[in-house]
Image: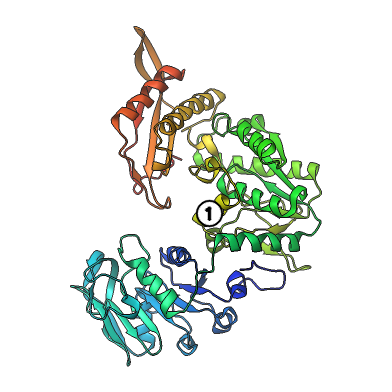
């Protein structure tokens, strides 16, 4: 398995060199990335590309299989997205999912019309042909539907593999050409045997082998980093999160002291976190970290600011200014290491090409702040070893190279930190109150062995005061909101049904131990309609 090299174009990356890739052509589905993740769970490499990808580009990649994603359009709409029809002449297995199946049917001579009855949510899959694509898929099992169109006439050579009560053509196949279509979404967790279907396509139909492994990725990444960087210096903005920490470990293993990690303390991290992070990296892992105390600078920038977007903007801009100053002081550096992940690559265009060298250079920094851009005269070549990985894959890499559990399994933490968990103006007093309250939350769920039961668990400080009574005296203090949620990927979330005795313990400790708080409330809002963070 190999990472992108100097001479290869962007599409000819790891999958091409590995000679084993499943390509997902994206037609605008919210689940396209999830399809790629499910394929990688089978230890086969996959990439999401635009439906506009040309036949020439596909031939360069030489995929073992192609998946056409779902999408919000109807294939008969004017201007509906279309893939190049020459795809059907490549001799490569194709699986169409929802819109992708309908497009397959239409382009190959079948008919798709608006269904008399739309089908959304769970449906029982009734199997007519239990072989091939549907091997080991249980008859009557639940699959997740989301379509308002239906195939009324199949192209020549196709047959029905399965149906539902409302959909006669729920799964179809042209066995000879290895073209398959499903009207449901096998990639979502609601489709009980969805992963089994994906495995059938990847292993049996596309004849792939499970070579996309953590060990292979780490070994090849180290070789690629050494070859790319040579004897030159690399700068990494370390946040303490799983992405930047995994990257720091990987780079240090590859190039040792050529790596400089910079940790900018903006004053918005949790209690004792900056000190623990620096000590952990320096003393336990022997990775040098340049600690930059910029707390006063950041707090000064937020005086009088209450709008959450303005908070983010100011924190981002100040981070860039500090980063620029410190990188010049510590430099010069030839390379900037960024913890860019695959979803970032798919969803954003935060890099540019140097017209002189043809190399990617940073015009935006994708730090833990996810904000702003570096000045254009401060240019680095990029080192992004994680840019083909999803978050769960980064955690796997982190575990394999010795990253401690407290970092690998750390709850997601916003780049602006506690500044956006304080509603309204951020002050030193409010930061200290929230740090202490947040510490109680984390301390108690750790004591109960429940830390990993939650996607996130934290406290929020509201900028209002309420009356209370403590020791026969009237108090007028802040309320703390507890936010504990369960989620798989942060896209949706549900409030956690926390045991009452745990809530009681947290509430009692916060009120008794945190000066300035006299009331604790629990947020029971799911996402949607709410968001996980309050700002």
Comparing 268 with 189, the one in front is 189
Whether 229 is drawn above or below 433: the answer is below
Question: To which residue does mark 1 refer?
Answer: 396
- Give the image location of residue 273, x and y in percent: 58, 33
- Give the image location of residue 110, x and y in percent: 32, 88
Left or right: 397 with respect to 481?
right
Left or right: 252 with respect to 113?
right
Comparing 533 with 134, the one in front is 134
SS type, badge 1 = helix
Q: How many labels were placed on the picture?
A: 1
Whether 153 is drawn above or below 200: the answer is below
- Residue 501 picture quarter: top left
* Residue 182 visible in the picture: no
- Residue 240 picture quarter: top right
Q: Residue at x 54, y 66 (%)?
A: 212
* Residue 333 visible in the picture: yes
């Amino acid at each position: 398995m190999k990472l992108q090299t100097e001479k290869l174009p962007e599409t000819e990356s790891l999958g091409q060199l590995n000679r084993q890739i499943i390509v997902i052509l994206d037609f605008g589905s919210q689940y396209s990335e999830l399809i790629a993740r499910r394929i990688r769970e089978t230890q086969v490499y996959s990439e999401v590309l635009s439906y506009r990808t040309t036949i020439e580009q596909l031939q360069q990649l030489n995929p073992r299989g192609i998946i056409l994603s779902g999408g919000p359009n109807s294939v008969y709409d004017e201007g509906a997205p279309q893939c190049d029809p020459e795809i059907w002449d490549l001799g490569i297995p194709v699986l169409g999912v929802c819109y992708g199946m309908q497009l397959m049917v239409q382009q190959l001579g079948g008919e798709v019309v608006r269904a008399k009855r739309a089908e959304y949510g769970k449906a029982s899959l009734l199997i007519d042909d239990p072989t091939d694509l549907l091997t080991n898929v249980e008859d009557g099992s639940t699959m997740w539907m989301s379509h308002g169109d239906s195939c009324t006439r199949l192209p020549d050579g196709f047959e029905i593999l399965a149906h539902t009560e409302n959909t006669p053509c729920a799964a179809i196949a042209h066995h000879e050409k290895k073209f398959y279509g499903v009207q449901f979404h096998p990639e979502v967790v609601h489709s009980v045997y969805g992963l089994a279907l994906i495995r059938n396509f990847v292993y049996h139909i596309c004849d792939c082998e499970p070579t996309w492994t953590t060990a292979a990725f780490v070994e090849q990444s180290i070789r690629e980093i050494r070859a790319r960087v040579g004897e030159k210096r690399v700068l990494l903005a370390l946040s303490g999160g799983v992405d930047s920490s995994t990257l720091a470990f990987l780079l240090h293993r590859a190039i040792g002291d050529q790596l400089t990690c910079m940790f900018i303390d903006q004053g918005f991290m949790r209690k004792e976190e900056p000190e623990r992070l620096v000590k952990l990296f320096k003393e336990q892992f022997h990775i040098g970290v340049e600690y930059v105390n910029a707390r006063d600078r950041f707090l000064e920038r937020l005086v009088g600011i209450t709008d959450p977007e303005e908070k983010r903007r100011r924190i981002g801009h100040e981070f860039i200014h500090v980063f620029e100053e410190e990188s010049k002081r510590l430099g010069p550096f030839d390379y900037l290491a960024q913890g860019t992940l695959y979803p970032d690559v798919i969803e954003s265009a935060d890099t540019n090409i140097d017209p002189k060298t043809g190399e990617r250079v940073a015009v935006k920094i994708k730090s833990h702040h996810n904000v702003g851009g570096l000045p254009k005269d401060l240019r680095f070549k990029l080192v992004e070893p994680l840019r083909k990985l999803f978050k769960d894959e980064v955690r796997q890499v982190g575990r394999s190279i010795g990253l401690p559990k407290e970092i690998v399994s750390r709850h997601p933490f916003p780049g602006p930190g506690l500044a956006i968990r304080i509603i309204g103006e951020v002050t030193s007093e409010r930061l200290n109150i929230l740090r202490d309250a947040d510490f109680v939350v984390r301390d108690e769920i750790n004591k109960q062995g429940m830390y990993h039961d939650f996607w996130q668990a934290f406290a929020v400080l509201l900028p209002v005061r309420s009356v209370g009574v403590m020791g026969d005296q009237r108090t007028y203090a802040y309320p703390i909101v507890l936010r504990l949620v369960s989620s798989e990927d942060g896209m949706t979330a549900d409030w956690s049904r926390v045991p009452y005795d745990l809530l009681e313990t947290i509430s009692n400790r916060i009120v008794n131990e945190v000066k300035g708080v006299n009331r604790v409330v629990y947020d029971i809002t799911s996402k949607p309609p709410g968001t996980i963070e309050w700002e």
